[in-house]
Image (tube, rainbow, N blue to C red):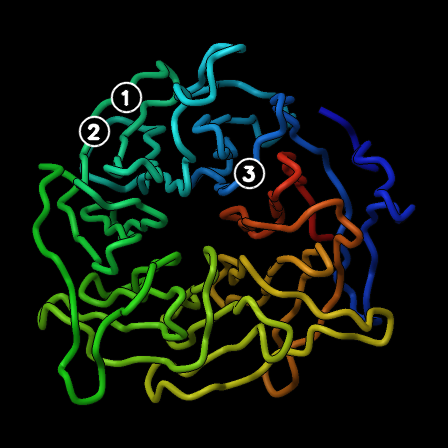
Amino acid sequence: MSKAGYGGGAQADGKIEQVTDIGSGNKRIRTRYTCNPGYSPISDCFCVRFSPDDQYLATSFANGAINIYNVETGRQEFVLNSTPPGTDLSATPLPTTQLRWRPHNAQSKTKSVLISVNAEFDGQILHWHIKSGKCLHTITERGNQLFCLDYFSDGSQFATAGRDRLVRVYDEATKRLVQTLQGGDMKDTAGHSNRVFSLKYHPQDPNIILSGGWDNTVQIWDTRRGHSVRSLWNCYLCGDSVDFSSDGSTILTGSWRTENALQTWDFGSGQVQETIEWQSASSKSTCMLFAAQFSKDAASSMILAGGSQENEAKFFVRQPGSKTAAFGALIQMPKPVFTVDWSASSKLAAVGGADGQVRVLEVV
């Protein structure tokens, strides 16, 4: 673990990674620590997730490993699904593509349960008990690489999606597949026609699920209908970059493109609410986004997003009646940002990417 300043060193072009303030508002960001699992060869970090009580930070990697850090200290506490050093690459697990903590108000008495999905040819959904390191349950989706999953807020159900374009809904208590969502009404919606990389439940309604991917759409699914009921068009999602605001009224998308990458949408009408300016007076660069997320406070008052081209993560504040504005950024990173997450308190944020390290920052 390296302290503030990252120890990330200079890039080949001489640029040094740094945290920068933007604008004249009262919010600022500062570095807390960097988590570096030290894998050799370096393994991309595909997902970061704070536990519901902000005690742990779970991180997943291209080599299949899941590393759990203590949020307060930044120290590594547990490692799941790891392979011994020197293992032949052909024998190592395929990437653990996404993680979610089971919400604490789930019916089960077991706390500290983490669910992961992977990109094996027969994709697996794994339930982990982090303190014992045990895999509690495995579900296999034959012939389907899995890229994303999400829990409903009460922990009663979860959904997965990936290469085969379908959204599958599972009952948490029985671990059984209860529904497969596919296609549309064949008038206004058609479901997905390509890989799905992002999935998000409505915060209050377990019947509504968002998903997005390579086909330039976000599909809005209704489990009561069994298919997509609406679509948002022209959003190209290549990572965990669709989100609902805490009240369910607004959708956030982060597209992997240089123009109009970060957008908010009105859930009721399906229309673009705002295209958020990435460029600022102090930063003329654009970023192709792999990750975007609302903060977890009741007002969803901030946004964090990151990606490639400029290899940066940027923090924005949402203010009623005015434009969403950047207030801080982590810039000149050595490699692209693949994943971001806000802590439950929205006071901390984690940023992971292709250099295999996870930066934890604080909003002050």
Residue name at image x 43 percent, y 64 percent: 243
Q: Are marks 1 and 2 in contact (CB under 8 Å)?
A: yes
State the SS at label 1.
strand
x, y percent for residue 270: 36, 85
User: Which label's residue is closer to the chain start, 2 or 3?
Assistant: 3
Q: Which mark is residue 158?
A: none
Circle 2: residue type: Thr
Q: Is residue 67 above or below residue 182?
A: above
Viewed as shown, does residue 325 lie left or right of 223?
right
Residue 73 in percent (x, y) is at 65, 25
- How far across and down, in percent of the image, does residue 196 sit? 34, 59
The residue labelled by disc 2 is: 138
Nearer to the camera, 125 or 2 = 125
Say which amino acid is labelled 1.
Cys
Is residue 309 left or right of 221 when viewed as pictured? Answer: right
**C-alpha span from label 1 to label 2:** 7 Å
User: Which residue is label 3 attached to?
Assistant: 45
Identify which residue, 64 or 126, lies in the foreground: 64
Q: Earlier in the sequence, mark 1 or mark 3?
A: 3
Q: Is residue 215 above or below residue 354?
A: below
Q: Cα distance, mark 1 to mark 3? A: 21 Å
Judging by the rendered image, the residue that carries numbered circle 1 is 135
